[in-house]
């Protein structure tokens, strides 16, 4: 009989396509995917604006962005929980303990990361790109677009880094999703719960999948950085 710590038992769950394993993996992937999409739509324009702009308060804005990037996930979860709870501003919408609540929380986590990476990519680009484009007749918007094309690998790195952060976090998913089986249980929350119950093989199976996802994400990020 396999030990609960057995790697063989964990691999068997993965190969057999255990429904609980598949459900947790799918929930993690689609909530994190939606969050990084929304976080990119918010973070990239902010990063570009801070990278190109020279305005009063820019340094303060960058400091605030760095603070948001370093904010603990449980604090983000607590703040959004307060907004979505029954007594909160958005309580009547009934979003708490739903996948949408998790997506909202993970978006808040992802956006500052994407914005910071975008800011670094834009700030590190050749400063002659935008003036040259405008000299050749391009408007500021079109010139900014040409700049984004030049730093596209940096933008992709921003998206990949943000995705890696949200898919591996547990605080926001646990507080806003409630770890409901078949609905809001993600890989990280399932690992925490099942391990505490003694289901080590199940937790290890999800840990292996999460490790594989993290490995692919980081390999892709390293490839982009070398480009």
Image: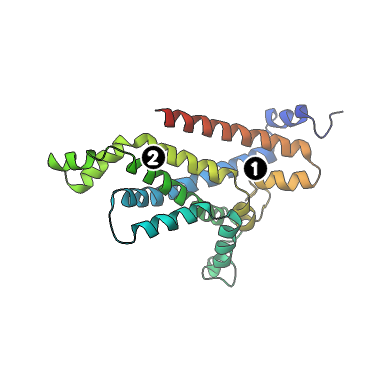
**Quick one: 224 or 36, which is closer to the camera?**
224
Within 10 Å of the Cα at label 1, are there few (<14), some (14-19), or many (20+) other Cα atoms? many
The x and y percentages for residue 22 are 64, 38
Q: Quadrant of the C terminus?
A: top left
The x and y percentages for residue 53 are 28, 52
**Quick one: 36 or 61, which is closer to the camera?**
61
Callout 2: helix, strand or loop?
helix
The answer to whether residue 59 is above or below residue 215 is: below
Toward which corner of the image does residue 138 lie, by quadrant?
A: top left
Tell which tag, 1 or 2, sits nearer the viewer. 2
Q: Is residue 29 left or right of residue 60?
A: right
Q: Looking at this rendering, what residue extends furthest in the right direction?
A: 1
User: Quick check: can you spot residue 94?
Assistant: no
The answer to whether residue 207 is above or below residue 173 is: above
**Quick one: 66 or 85, which is closer to the camera?**
66
The x and y percentages for residue 77 are 58, 58
User: Quick check: can you spot residue 29?
Assistant: yes
Q: Which residue is mark 1?
A: 187
Q: Is residue 9 left or right of residue 70?
A: right
The x and y percentages for residue 76 are 56, 58
**Quick one: 174 or 12, which is closer to the camera?**
174
Residue shown at 26%/42% (left/top)? 145
Q: Which residue is mark 2?
A: 155
Whole-number angstrom distance, CA of label 1 to CA of label 2: 27 Å
Residue shown at 52%/52% (left/top)? 70
Within 10 Å of the Cα at label 2, are there few (<14), some (14-19), or many (20+) other Cα atoms? many
């Amino acid at each position: 009989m396999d030990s609960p710590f057995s790697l063989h038992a964990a691999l068997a769950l993965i190969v057999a396509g255990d429904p609980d394993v598949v459900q947790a993996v799918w929930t993690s992937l689609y909530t994190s995917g939606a969050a990084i999409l929304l976080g990119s739509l918010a973070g990239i324009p902010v990063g570009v604006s801070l990278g190109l702009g020279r305005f009063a308060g820019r340094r303060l804005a960058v400091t605030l962005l760095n603070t948001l990037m370093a904010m603990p996930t449980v604090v983000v979860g607590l703040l959004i929980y307060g907004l979505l709870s029954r007594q909160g501003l958005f309580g009547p919408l009934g979003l708490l303990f739903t996948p949408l609540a998790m997506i909202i929380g993970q978006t808040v986590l992802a956006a500052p990361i994407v914005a910071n990476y975008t800011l670094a990519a834009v700030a590190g680009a050749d400063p002659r790109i935008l003036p040259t484009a405008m000299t050749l007749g391009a408007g500021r918007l079109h010139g900014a677009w040409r700049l984004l094309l030049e730093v596209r690998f940096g933008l992709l790195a921003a998206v990949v880094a943000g995705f890696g952060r949200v898919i591996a976090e547990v605080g926001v998913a646990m507080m806003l999703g409630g770890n409901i089986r078949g609905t809001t249980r993600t890989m990280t929350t399932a690992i925490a719960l099942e391990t505490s119950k003694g289901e080590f093989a199940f937790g290890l199976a999800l840990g292996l999948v999460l490790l594989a996802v993290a490995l692919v994400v980081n390999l892709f990020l390293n490839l982009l950085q070398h480009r």
